[in-house]
Each structure stands twice: as C-alpha cells, then as structure tokens.
Amino acid sequence: LYFSAQEGILIFYHIKDLEYEIKICADISQPISSLMFSPDYTSLLIVTDQGTVYSYRPAHSGEAVKLLDTSSNCFLAADFLTPGNNYCVSVTISGEVQVWSLEDGTFLSKLNLGIEVHV
C-alpha cells in the first residue's frame, strides 16, 4: 500500500497477515495531490499541488525523479497515457490537455478544450 503524507512524503506499507512494515520511499517536500501506477505497475507517478510530476520505480527503491514542472500553467492532474509507460497526459485548470515524454520530460503536444476544468 502506497500513500502520501501531507508533508510530501511517499510511504509504503507492506502488510502480511497481521503484521506490517512501514518504509519511507521518497521525500518530495511538496504536498502530493495524487499517485497513479502505470498499467504494468512498474512506475508510480507522483503529482504535487504545485504542478510538479515525479516518477518512482518501486522495484528500484531509488529516489523519486522529477519529470516535469508545469507550475506556471495552473496544473490540475496527470496520468499515464496508455498503452505503455512512455507518455503522460496532463490537464490545466484552463482546459489545456498536454502530452509529455516520461523519458526526459519533453513536451510533445497540446489540445485546448476551450473550457475550465475541475476535479
């Protein structure tokens, strides 16, 4: 079970039978708004309130890697663009849908919906 603390800490609970183990995986230092696993569960997207997106690979037990920072665009949400784990899609409050490469955070494309978006 992965979850985030209010302070921006990614925590993993390993639960087996009646016992559990707690592990701090990453300290993002920004409030985390959402966590999304890739379709094959190898990567975890970490989205912050400020519009920064990080990637965390549980099997590698490394630090979270900053993929992109869209804080100037009133960023609202992001998720994997399937099939695969190579791209993510984000949306801004103003209704701009953006596609990003997860390899290097390169901006690839955008589409303006022409409406304000809410969650």
Image (cartoon, grey):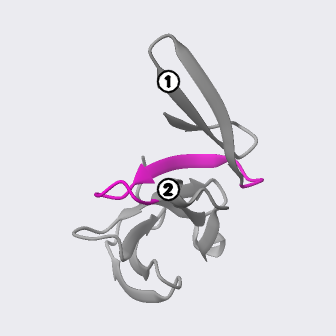
Query: Is residue 119 rendered magenta in the image?
Result: no
Tag 1, which secondary structure?
strand
The amino acid type, in three-letter code, at marker 1 is: Ile
Identify residue for label 2. Answer: 59
Which labelled disc corresponds to residue 63? none
Q: Residues within 10 Å of mark 2 (few under 14, many from 20)?
A: few
The amino acid type, in three-letter code, at marker 2 is: Ala
> Please, what is the dominant secondary structure of the magenta stretch?
loop
Report the residue that reaches farthest toward the top: 18
Q: Nearer the viewer, residue 111 or 22?
A: 22
Q: How many marks?
A: 2
Identify residue for label 1. Answer: 15
The x and y percentages for residue 89 are 38, 70
Alpha carbon separation for disc pair 1 and 2: 17 Å
Q: Nearer the viewer, residue 64 or 82?
A: 64
Q: Which residues are magenta?
A: 28-43
The x and y percentages for residue 69 are 63, 73
Q: Residue at x 57, y 21 (%)?
A: 20
Q: Could you tell whether 41 is left or right of 52 in the image?
A: left
Tag 2, which secondary structure?
helix
Q: Residue at x 65, y 69 (%)?
A: 71
The earlier-in-sequence mark between 1 and 2 is: 1
Query: Is residue 35 rendered magenta in the image?
Result: yes
Q: Is residue 43 visible?
A: yes
Compared with 74, 29 (above or below) is: above
The x and y percentages for residue 32 are 63, 48
Q: Could you tell whether 50 is left or right of 41 in the image?
A: right
Q: Nearer the viewer, residue 96 or 20?
A: 20
Q: Nearer the viewer, residue 68 or 59?
A: 59
